[in-house]
Image (spheres, grey):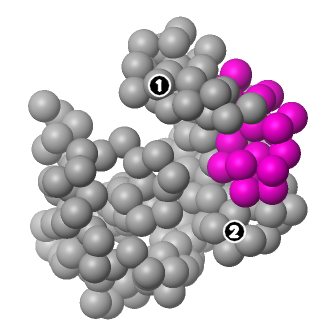
């Protein structure tokens, strides 16, 4: 139930911010810049999941809702740059808090996925491997699963079964151990492509 509520909040944020991604999201409601950053990252995750992923974990009805905005790389670029600039500003003000480090890892993963879809595979792989190192050092299995998913997409796009196999297997094991069954199913589909 909590995931559904968060999903619909992200949809509302995505729709309301689509026109002007550089404007703040109703700061009076959200509160401060740290919460705005978290909302922006969630918005980007949802946008990326629906628009750029090969196997999105959303229902067909939710996917149909986003069909008109499928060719929206400019929005992704602007929204990601805004979130990164907000993160930089917060790090300068507050230092590298635990929440800001998590935001940095999530944005690194999103940036790597974005570079992959632009065809900049070497840059994407570098970003994603850095994100994976950081996730392994201080992150949760969820972050590692997300990074492995993006690395699997690189393996598919570059026709590299070694990369695909290594990270799909890692993703599958992490997802099973953490009881994330949809992600385990996605990893199984990746393994089937090897």
Q: Is residue 138 visible?
A: no
> Horizontally, is 8 left or right of 159 in the view?
left
Decide: is 25 above or below 169.
below
What distance separates the C-alpha of mark 2 from that of mark 1?
25 Å
- Residue 81: image location, x then y, percent: 55, 78
Residue 73 part of the magenta-drawn span: no
- Label 1 Cα crowd, 10 Å radius (few <14 / some 14-19 / many 20+): some
Decide: is 115 above or below 10.
below
> Horizontally, is 93 left or right of 68 in the view?
right
First reached walking from the N terminus: tag 2 or tag 1: 2
Q: Which mark is residue 159?
A: none
Which residue reaches farthest front? Answer: 193
Q: Which residue is mark 1?
A: 185
Decide: is 194 above or below 129.
above
Magenta stretch in the rendered image: 152-171
**Residue closer to the observer: 39 or 158:** 158
Q: Secondary structure at mark 2?
A: helix
Q: Secondary structure at mark 1?
A: helix
- Overall secondary structure of the magenta stretch? helix
Decide: is 142 above or below 53.
above
> Going 74% across and 71% down the picture, which residue do you hit?
119
- Label 2 Cα crowd, 10 Å radius (few <14 / some 14-19 / many 20+): some
- Residue 190: image location, x then y, percent: 62, 34
**Residue closer to the observer: 153 or 44:** 153
Choose top left, top right, bottom left or bottom right for residue 132. Answer: top right
> Going 69% across and 68% down the picture, which residue do you hit?
115
> Going 86% across and 35% down the picture, which residue do you hit?
162
Choose top left, top right, bottom left or bottom right for residue 57. Answer: top left
**Residue closer to the observer: 21 or 29:** 21
Q: Which residue is mark 2?
A: 115
- Residue 58: image location, x then y, percent: 30, 46
């Amino acid at each position: 139930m909590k995931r559904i509520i968060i999903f619909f909040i992200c949809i509302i944020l995505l729709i309301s911010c689509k026109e002007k991604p550089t404007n703040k999201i109703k700061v009076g409601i959200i509160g401060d810049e740290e919460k705005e950053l978290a909302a922006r990252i969630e918005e980007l995750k949802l946008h990326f999941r629906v628009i750029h992923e090969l196997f999105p974990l959303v229902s067909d009805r939710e996917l149909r809702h986003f069909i008109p905005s499928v060719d929206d790389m400019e929005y992704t670029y602007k929204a990601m740059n805004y979130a990164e600039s907000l993160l930089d500003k917060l790090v300068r003000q507050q230092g590298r808090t635990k929440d800001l480090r998590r935001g940095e890892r999530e944005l690194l993963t999103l940036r790597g996925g974005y570079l992959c879809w632009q065809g900049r595979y070497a840059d994407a792989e570098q970003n994603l491997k850095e994100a994976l190192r950081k996730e392994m050092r201080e992150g949760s299995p969820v972050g590692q699963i997300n990074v492995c998913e993006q690395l699997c997409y690189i393996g598919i796009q570059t026709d590299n079964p070694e990369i695909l196999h290594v990270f799909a297997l890692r993703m599958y094991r992490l997802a099973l151990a953490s009881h994330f069954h949809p992600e385990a199913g996605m990893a199984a589909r990746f393994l089937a492509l090897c």
